[in-house]
Image (cartoon, grey):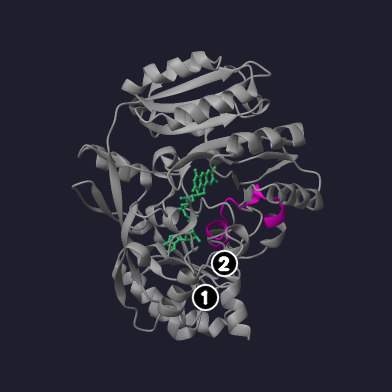
Amino acid sequence: MTDNETLQQLCADLDGLEMSTEDRALQRYSKDFSWFSPVLVEQLRGKQAELVVKPASEEEVKRVAAACSRHRIPLTLRGSGTGNYGQSTPLHGGVLMDMSGLNRILWIKDGVARVQAGARLVDIDKAAREHGWELRLMPSTYRLATAGGFFCGGFGGVGSITYGSIGDPGNVLGVRALSMAEQPEAEELRGAEARDLYHAYGVNGLITELEFALAPALDWRENLLSFPDFMQAVRFCQALGSTCGTMKKLLTLLADPLPQMCGLEDRIPAGHTAVVAIVNRPGMDALHELREKFGGQLVEEQSHAEVFGTTKSMIEHSWNHTTLHIFRKHKDITYLQSGFRPWENVEKVEQMHHHFGEEVMLHLEFLRADGAVTCSGLQVIRYTSEERLNDIIQFHRDNGVFVSNPHTYILEDGGKLTVDPGQLAMKRRLDPQGLLNPGKMRTWDEEAAA
Ligand SMILES: Cc1cc2nc3c(=O)[nH]c(=O)nc-3n(C[C@H](O)[C@H](O)[C@H](O)COP(=O)(O)OP(=O)(O)OC[C@H]3O[C@@H](n4cnc5c(N)ncnc54)[C@H](O)[C@@H]3O)c2cc1C
């Protein structure tokens, strides 16, 4: 933690910037949605910043980085704080920098948008539509989430059924990143170098601008479907996801009893599986052909444009929004995030469904991984103990289902279980003092201790 005198010097260095040392602000800005995990709640209890600062320009970001570097004070960035693994919770105090003041959309042309890191995704999408384009991908938190927070803390979401993850080559074309140094330098990083900052929790550079590749704006229809048979619903999603002639934006499956738990009980009968499918208007014929083939019923259809940005959109029943609705009503549950390998995903889903029954309730998001249509799981689990949760995770791993553990704030443990050499090299380059969001990248800490 920072001694009082140093903190006062820091505040003097940052004179003129919007900032606060008030305890309520420190608590509020140091928290994200890690309360989703009973494990993280314990691990992150009491962790908070000593100063919150909100720059309004890149020059001000540089001033903050320079001052923290000079005084050797940790610096953690925050977009909107919707991350759910404590990514933006400072483990070692220091400064929390709220990036939401850098919210300009710089330009949109030829299918590309250049934005400041704190711009909200909903605003970028709306602005792109005025030019005939739309965002390829956004998390279900798009109404709050920022461009920088999505790239550095997120994965994918709405749009992943066509475009995969935000870290897939071609989705983010470049970033402007500052080094953490007494004299911060701005670097324009393109392609693979830019992707070294993807999903790195802001430990290896301060992003001030991003360039997103866009998709042509389409006339989307949001559909809610009901299936009496779980496996037929899974096969429907796999088939619809794989049709080449239909454009897709979202394909979500909620096994019984999840629809009854997440606010769909007025529309989906008990015992049925719900599917949310957002497809382009001409794709509706193919959707109905497949719906009939797999025995589903159409419950509701609405225009995506009319409900986008509101709680009426069916996006509210996708990705971790489903988890959020369930958590609000049910206290004895937790969740997992997993990935099923393409080509065997349907069989593995069936195996997990039979093995765990209602202890692990299947919420699937269909998406593209390396070009193939597969699904990820945001399983809702009846929580009994950490030990049992670990057993469930291990069973998935032993049976070839990748688990991206949402119950850890350590970068390596949540994802690939190994360090990403590109991320580590970028940290050496842009944060040689190791001051950015310290404690989240285990490999760096181990190297520093050796
Ligand atoms: C209900 C719910 C639903 C969700 N659904 C999805 C989903 O569909 N898909 C998905 O991928 N995620 C999802 N998430 C997680 C999260 O909402 C998204 O990843 C979101 O994009 C994070 O954006 P944010 O602005 O809130 O980032 P924050 O949570 O504020 O930050 C995320 C990380 O990025 C770092 N960071 C922020 N800005 C910068 C910057 N400019 N430079 C460097 N580092 C930076 C922070 O330090 C932090 O480590 C969900 C979470 C919740 C609670």
Instruction: Indicate the position of residue 25 as horizontal and vertical percent values.
Output: 53, 60
Residue sitting at x 39%, y 43%: 163
- Identify residue for label 2: 90
Question: Is residue 298 in view?
Answer: no
- Identify residue for label 1: 74
State the predominant SS element of the stretch in magenta: helix
Residue 278 located within the stretch drawn in magenta: no
* Residue nearest the viewer, comparing 349 with 268: 349
Instruction: Left or right? Give the position of 303 relative to 398.
Output: left
Instruction: Left or right? Give the position of 323 relative to 369.
Output: right
Q: Within 8 Å: ligand 1 and the Cβ of disc 1? A: no
Q: Which residues are magenta?
A: 26-40
Element on which disc 1 rests: loop
Dots 1 and 2: beta carbons under 8 Å?
yes
Q: Amino acid at mark 1?
A: Pro
**How many numbered callouts?**
2
Residue sitting at x 56%, y 18%: 226
Instruction: Indicate the position of residue 24 as horizontal and vertical percent values.
Output: 57, 59
**Which label's residue is closer to the chain start, 1 or 2?**
1
State which quadrant residue 182 falls in: bottom left
Instruction: Left or right? Give the position of 314 relative to 147.
Output: right
Instruction: Left or right? Give the position of 51 relative to 406.
Output: left
Instruction: Indicate the position of residue 131 as horizontal and vertical percent values.
Output: 20, 40
* Residue nearest the viewer, comparing 9 with 134: 134
Residue 28 located within the stretch drawn in magenta: yes
276 up-or-down from 23: above or below: above
Question: Is residue 6 in view?
Answer: yes
Specify the label residue 94 is tagged with. none
Instruction: Indicate the position of residue 263 as horizontal and vertical percent values.
Output: 59, 26
